[in-house]
Image (cartoon, grey):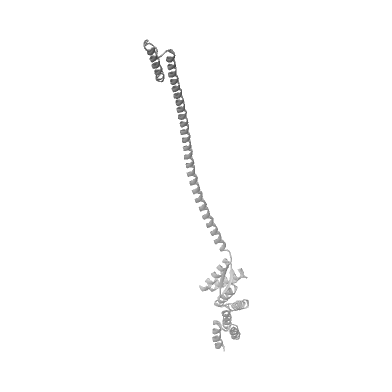
Amino acid sequence: MTSRNAKTCRPLAAAVFAACVLMGAGGAHAGLFDDDEARRAILEIRQRIDANKAQTDKLSQDLQRANSENAQLRSSLLTLQGQIETLRADQATMRGQNEQLARDVADLQRGQKDIAKGVDERLRQFEPAKVTVDGMEFTASPSEQRDFDAALATFRKGNFTEAQTGFSEFMKRYPQSGYTPSALFWLGNAQYANRNYRDAITNFRSLLSQAPNHARAPEAALSIANCQTELKDAKAARKTLEDLLKAYPQSEAASAAKERLARLR
């Protein structure tokens, strides 16, 4: 017999024992309990025992069900916790990927800016730009400006033969250039330095014809007179100086022209 059944039977046995004692006690007690009363007492005790047993069984079943539900709840909580940890790990991974993506985008944008800057710089090497030479403003290409500056630098170094070639080639390469009046002036001076007086006169006169108001025009006229003097043509030189005084009376070249006219007379 199990412990639980023993506990259940103890109250019943005690009740039966008590009933027997009462029934065998003799005539003095026969009036207290008869058979029906003993039976009812036993039945009541049994009913209480059965009720207690049923309540105990119900409580046991409720406890088992609660334990099962708690186990399921714990399992669900563990599963949920695992899902949360997985989500956190995924979120951390995504955050790292987003940060890397942001860095990649920033690097790409910087690269695009550098490329655009490089393209702009290269384009500027070929795009015309405004320049001012001898008081004249005009638009010139970078190569145009480079070639003129190179020829002028050669002249200033005293290499007049190379400078003469440089300015001649410049005017052939850029026939419509805004540099042309200045190029004619420096070409004439290079030819003068090389004692090529007649060609120098031709280029100085071209300057005066194309740009009579050019800043170098008075000097060009004076240089024509100088070339004519070197060619021993005093009459032509005198005429050139007189025309210079009429055309450019306020210029510095006019002051020099007056002095040379005085010497020629």
- The residue under the point 59% across, 74% down is 181
Find residue 225 and report its image quarter. bottom right
Q: Is residue 54 left or right of residue 204?
A: left
In the displayed structure, 79 sits above or below 24; it is below
**Relative to the observer, which residue lies in front, 76 or 200?**
76
- The residue under the point 47% across, 33% down is 73
Q: Is residue 19 left or right of residue 154?
A: left
Q: Quadrant of the N terminus?
A: top left
Find residue 178 and report its image quarter. bottom right
Q: Quadrant of the C terminus?
A: bottom right
* Residue 184 rendering spot, x and y as whole percentages: 59, 75
- The residue under the point 53% across, 54% down is 109
* Residue 16 rendering spot, x and y as whole percentages: 40, 15
* Residue 54 rendering spot, x and y as whole percentages: 46, 23
* Residue 191 rendering spot, x and y as whole percentages: 57, 76
Find residue 121 and report its image quarter. bottom right
**Relative to the observer, which residue lies in front, 174 or 69?**
69
